[in-house]
Each structure stands twice: as C-alpha cells, then as structure tokens.
Image (cartoon, rainbow, N blue to C red):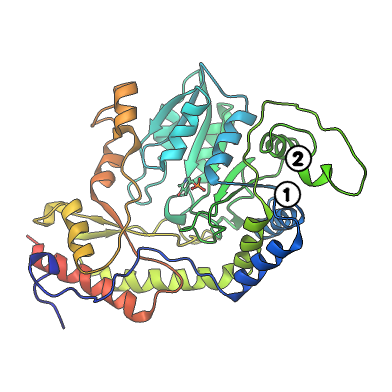
C-alpha cells in the first residue's frame, strides 16, 4: 500500500499518467456511422436526425422528440414556447447548471431560486412551493447526477398552482421514476448529448414531450421559426415556399450529430450497467469513510438513477483542508475531478444583478462549498477505479482531524 504522504504533501503521485475526469466511449460503430453521413451528400438536418428522434422516443417512452444543437437550446425553447417573458418569474434550484438560470434571463423573466433536499441535491418541493408568487409561470427541475427529483410532489404543487414543469434531464438519460423513464413524464423534458453526458453527439440535445402542439412549436422555433424544414425544402416533392411563423432560432440538430447519437444510443444499456458497477464499487469503498457523505438518491419502486456522476460531499468539519485544497490534492495524484455545482445565486452576475447573498439557500450553500465529483465513465479500468479510491483515502487519512 502507498498509504503514505499525498503527492500534494511531497509523496509520490498514485498515478504516473493523468486520469481524465471523463472520456467518451467512441468505437468503430460511431466512426462508421459518421463516415457514412459524410459521404452521403446530406450532412445537415435530415433523415438521420428524424431517426434519432424516433429512437429516443422509443427509448424514453415520450411521444415526440425534437433534435437540437444543445441541451441549453432545449431549456430556452421550453420557456419561449410557453410565452414566458418580462414580468414573469421562473423557479429553479440553487444547485444547477449555469444554463438553467441563464435561459430565464434570455427570455427576460426573473429567476427565483429554491433550496435543495440534502440527500439528493434536487430541488426541495416544499421550498419550491414557498417561492411561488402570482407571477410564477414555470419551474425548471434538475435531476442532479441522474437521480430523479420527487416528481409526484413537484407535479402536485405545479398542477394546483397552474405552473409548467420543465425537466432538465441532461444528467438523466436512462433514469426511471416510479416505472416511467425520465423524458416521458412532463410536457417539457430536455436531454443533452454534450461530450461528458451518458451518450454524446459531441455537442447536441433533445427535447421530448407527449403534447403534439408543443412538439410542433419547439420544432419550428428550432429552425428560424419557418414552417418546413430544410430537408423538405430541397426534396423531390417539388419546390414549396416556406413561411416565417415566429422569429425562431438556429438550434437544430444535424445528421452528423444524429449519426453519432444513433450509434451511442444502441449501447446505452451496457453504458448504464457499467456506470452502475463503478458507482457501487465506489459506494462500497467509501461506506466506512466518515469524512465523506455519499448521495444515493431515490431508489426502489421502479425508480432508478442514470448514474451520470459520482459526487461526494466532504465533511470539511472533520478535515484540515477545504474542498478546493482537496481538489488540488486529488489532481496532484494525477486524477481529474469535477464540481457539480457551485450555487448559482452566488455567481458574480446573479449576486450583482439581484443582490443575492450567502444565507439565502443554506442547503445549497453547504453543498456548493463541499461537493466534488470523482471520475465515472464507461471505459475506466478496474485499476483506474482502484487508483481513485486509493487517492481519496490516502488524502483523507493524511488530512483528517
Ligand atoms: C450539460 C447540462 C446542460 C446543458 O447542456 P448543453 O448540451 O451543454 O447545452 C444543462 N443542464 C445540466 C444539468 C447539464 O448538466
């Protein structure tokens, strides 16, 4: 055992080469699919994007899907399609990604943050309810780390108060809630296929819904607000004029992305299985480390995580170092880490614009100061996982109080 000094304190790093925080799993299938599109003569939005939309519907159980160039585009279009703007308020959780708050600014509405549940880091339904005013039009809930939010409680409150529910499912492809796949429950669901997500198209996203009118509106808004997409414009049906129905956006997915996505989606079951195995190995290894709080999320009765990230919360009261020093120490062992996330209301723009301050959302701030994510990706080897465990234990052992 190398349970001596951490590299940060002068010891030898546990790894010689750097273990990336994340690495996508790209095989021959992906390369072949993309290469076929490149040679086909049609590289923008076309039949493959439609096929990927259909396959994602089949996988999630949603009735409609719209391919987009990012998850952020999907969050934005959800608000635009609801007609949300100046004078309206949108609630989201204080722990979430930048995009969850930024899109509320993009439509000119007021972001209102709710605190999180300590055990999951998902929005706290009781605090969500407290933050509702006459101006509240929607709530954006984030299934943090792939663990489903308390959708029964959220939907009950939202229905009673006539508020739209938007699910940021960017971490949650493959998760289920009470027997239903995430993506098939609400009228507004957003997935991301960014390089680090459960499946990737490099950059990309998908909007899913069960409502045909919402699907149609988001589809039109994603391509300049015009009534017929480019593929149909140049097909063999003969020339047809297109009309601008809304001042739309340039947010569409295109076939090179869809080719990658189709190849990735075929592998989703094996990806999820591997993510679960790694998660369980970390859980076993860290269950006896009192300085770490693990987040297991909701489980049982048809509710399952998508195992997107492996966050730990450092009980810094029991350590001589803070979270940022812990990050330095892990990186010094040649291991990459991530942070998901620091509280949005404490970022400079939101502090300055709305005079948000510390103390407003205590649970979110507790997590914001203490959370870090360990590497979790399909191609990690058993010895990679062992290195991460050894590094974390070595550092905690050295710096514990
Ligand atoms: C990745 C992510 C997004 C944004 O996705 P992009 O495709 O990068 O725009 C939104 N929300 C959460 C929680 C994310 O992790």
Foreground of the two, 106 or 259: 259
In percent of width and height, residue 127 lies at: 39, 33
As drawn, 165 above or below 69: above
Q: Secondary structure at mark 1?
A: loop
Q: Are marks 2 and 1 in contact (CB under 8 Å)?
A: yes
Quarter holding residue 85: top right
Question: Where is residue 230 drawn, in percent x and y?
Answer: 77, 43
Counting from the top left corner in percent of width and height, residue 342 is at 31, 43
Where residue 386 appears, as percent x and y from the top left, is 29, 77
Q: Which residue is mark 1?
A: 63
Q: Is residue 286 left or right of residue 74?
A: left
Residue 36 located left or right of residue 4: right
- Residue under the point 55% across and 46% down: 70
Looking at the image, residue 308 sits to the left or right of residue 230; the answer is left
> Which residue is outermost to the right?
238
Q: Secondary structure at mark 2?
A: helix
| Mark 1 residue crowding within 10 angstroms, few (<14) / some (14–19) / many (20+) | some
150 horizontally vs 229: left or right = left
User: Separation of disc 2 and disc 1 at Cα?
Assistant: 8 Å
Asked if 166 appears above or below 84 in the picture, the reply is below
In the picture, residue 298 is in which quadrant?
bottom left
Write the residue at 24% across / 76% down: 16
Q: Residue at x 46, y 30 (%)?
A: 91
The C terminus sits in image quarter: bottom left
Q: Quadrant of residue 28?
A: bottom right
Q: Earlier in the sequence, mark 2 or mark 1?
A: 1
Around disc 2, counting alpha carbons within 10 Å, would you say few (fewer than 14), some (14 to 19), or many (20 or more)? few
On residue 212, which mark appears? Answer: 2
Give 220 or 266, whichever is nearer the viewer. 220
């Amino acid at each position: 055992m190398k349970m001596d000094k951490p590299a940060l304190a002068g010891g030898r790093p546990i790894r010689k080469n750097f273990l990336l925080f994340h690495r996508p799993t790209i095989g021959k299938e992906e390369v072949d699919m993309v290469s076929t599109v490149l040679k086909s003569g049609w590289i923008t939005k076309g039949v493959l994007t439609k096929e990927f939309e259909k396959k994602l519907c089949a996988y999630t159980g949603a009735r409609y899907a719209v391919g987009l160039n990012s998850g952020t585009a999907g969050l934005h279009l959800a608000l635009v399609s609801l007609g949300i703007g100046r004078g309206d308020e949108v609630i989201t959780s204080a722990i979430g990604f930048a995009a969850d708050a930024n899109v509320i600014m993009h439509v000119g509405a007021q972001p209102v943050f709710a605190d999180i549940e300590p055990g999951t880091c998902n929005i706290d339904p009781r605090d969500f309810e407290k933050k509702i005013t006459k101006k509240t039009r929607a709530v954006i809930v984030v299934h943090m780390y792939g663990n489903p939010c308390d959708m029964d409680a959220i939907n009950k409150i939202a229905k009673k108060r006539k508020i739209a529910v938007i699910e940021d499912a960017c971490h949650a492809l493959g998760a289920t809630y009470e027997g239903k796949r995430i993506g098939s429950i609400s009228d507004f669901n957003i997935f991301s296929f960014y390089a680090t997500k459960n499946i990737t198209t490099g950059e990309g996203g998908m909007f899913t819904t069960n409502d045909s009118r919402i699907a149609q509106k988001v589809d039109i808004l994603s391509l300049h607000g015009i009534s017929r997409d480019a593929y149909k414009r140049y097909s063999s049906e003969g020339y047809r004029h297109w009309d601008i129905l809304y001042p739309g956006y340039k947010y569409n997915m295109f076939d090179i992305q869809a080719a990658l996505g189709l190849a990735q989606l075929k592998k989703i079951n094996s990806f999820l299985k591997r993510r679960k195995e790694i998660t369980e190995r970390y859980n076993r290894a860290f269950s006896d480390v009192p300085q770490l709080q693990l987040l297991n999320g909701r489980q049982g009765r048809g509710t399952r995580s998508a195992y997107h990230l492996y966050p730990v919360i450092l009980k810094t009261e029991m350590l001589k170092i803070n979270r940022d020093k812990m990050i330095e120490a892990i990186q010094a062992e040649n291991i990459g880490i991530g942070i998901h996330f620091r509280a949005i209301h404490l970022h400079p723009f939101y502090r300055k614009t709305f005079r948000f301050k510390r103390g407003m959302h205590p649970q979110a701030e507790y997590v914001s100061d203490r959370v870090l994510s360990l590497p979790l990706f399909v191609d990690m080897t058993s010895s990679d996982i062992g290195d991460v465990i050894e590094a974390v234990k070595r550092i905690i052992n050295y710096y514990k109080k």
